[in-house]
Amino acid sequence: MKFKRGRGVIARYRDFLPITDKTPVISLGEGDTPLIFCPELSKRVGRGCRVFVKNEGVNPTGSFKDRGMTVAASMSMERGARALICASTGNTSASAAAYAARAGISCSVILPAGKIARGKLLQAFAYGAKIVAIDGNFDDALGIVRELGERGDFVIVNSINPDRIAGQKTAAFEIVDEIGDAPDYHVLPVGNAGNITAYWTGYREYHARQRSTKLPAMIGFQAAGAAPIFHNRIIEEPETIASAIRIGNPASWKQARAAIEESRGAVDVVTDEEILDAQIWLARHEGIFVEPASAAAIGGLLKCCDSNEAVYSFRKIQEESRIVCTVTGHGLKDADVIMQRMRELKPVAATLNAVRRALEL
Ligand code: F0G
């Protein structure tokens, strides 16, 4: 069947997925997200380079997780699952809850108490998930979920489930299909390291099937206070404003290392300040509003251009390189982060003059 917009990643990339004729397809029309050319970002990089942002925030639940969740939920249904479970820093739980609702099965989510952006928590509630907050971090929650999964009560839909990675690799396919080849560089944030694993899998598969002539260098960014892969050690108490990537012991650590090494890429860190500055910069210069974890990729790209401390310097890269940056989640999910930066709005009189004065006209 010919590809039609909005039918979801399974309809579009079935041949590359573990889907069979018997699989009930659970989809909310995920994927097919815009690859946006960014003139201001391109100027910052210079050397005639072209920077594109893959905006995953426009997926059905506002993050890239939906690509993997459609496959994980569909395969779970084929295997007769009654309940899904995940640990999450927020987005996985929102996505799992939505796809479980769509499938008509239950969903339980285990979250670090007080560390989930409000919008994500509201989503999990709205979609009807059973929500348990623990006095611990994401890594503790994932440990508990693994144990519950082993008892056979639930299907785990974290990215340790290979169906999640299979679905998420479709983002790499879309990029190659759209620009006609793989980019030279792919920049993205890294938390539990499922997404960098998925992109690298996707790029390699397409390359093996001659859909692209090259492979990109994978460049991952972690938050400075939650950078186990960068420091090469478990971080017991990870801390960052980018709550989505507040992870000290990523499940796909080894696969992420392999992606970085095989692609001759790099892993680097960005501070919370760089993350927040990049979030506002992207919104105001390119009109793309992303959550802090996503801004880590943008902050990282800017660091590669501006800082002598960057692991990877874009000042020496080949001219006219193509760079793709994945922004993983929508800015509205974490409204509190932005609210903190806003001044209080004091109403003025409802008169033309008062409004003119307020606008400094
Ligand atoms: N960006 C956002 C917005 C995320 O929610 C996550 C992960 C990442 C980046 C990092 O991706 O884990 O594949 O390296 N969020 C997970 C969650 C952990 O529970 O929602 P990763």
Image (spheres, rainbow, N blue to C red):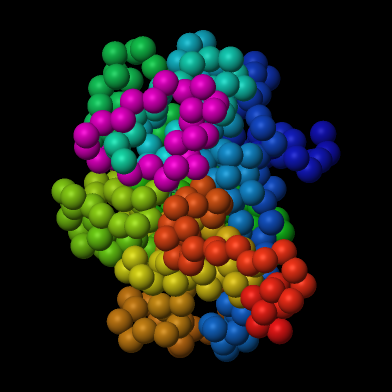
Quarter assignment of residue 226? bottom left
- Magenta segment boundaries in residue numbering: 115-139
- At a point 20% along the width and 59% down the height, the residue shown is 232
The image shows residue 293 at horizontal and vertical percentages of 43, 56
The image shows residue 211 at horizontal and vertical percentages of 66, 55
Q: Is residue 125 left or right of residue 248?
A: right
Residue 53 can be seen in this image: no
Does the magenta portion include 301?
A: no
| Number of numbered discs overlaid on the protein picture | 0
Quarter in which the N terminus is drawn? top right
- At a point 61% along the width and 56% down the height, the residue shown is 55
Quarter in which the C terminus is drawn? bottom right
| Residue sitting nearer the eye, 128 or 308 | 128
| Residue sitting nearer the eye, 277 or 66 | 277
Does the magenta portion include 130?
A: yes
Q: Is residue 142 left or right of residue 301?
A: left
The image shows residue 280 at horizontal and vertical percentages of 51, 69
Quarter assignment of residue 181? bottom right
Residue 173 can be seen in this image: yes
Quarter assignment of residue 261? bottom left
| Residue sitting nearer the eye, 200 or 214 | 200
- At a point 48% along the width and 40% down the height, the residue shown is 120
Q: Is residue 321 above or below residue 335?
A: below
The image shows residue 180 at horizontal and vertical percentages of 71, 63
- At a point 44% along the width and 42% down the height, the residue shown is 118
Q: Is residue 349 above or below residue 190?
A: below
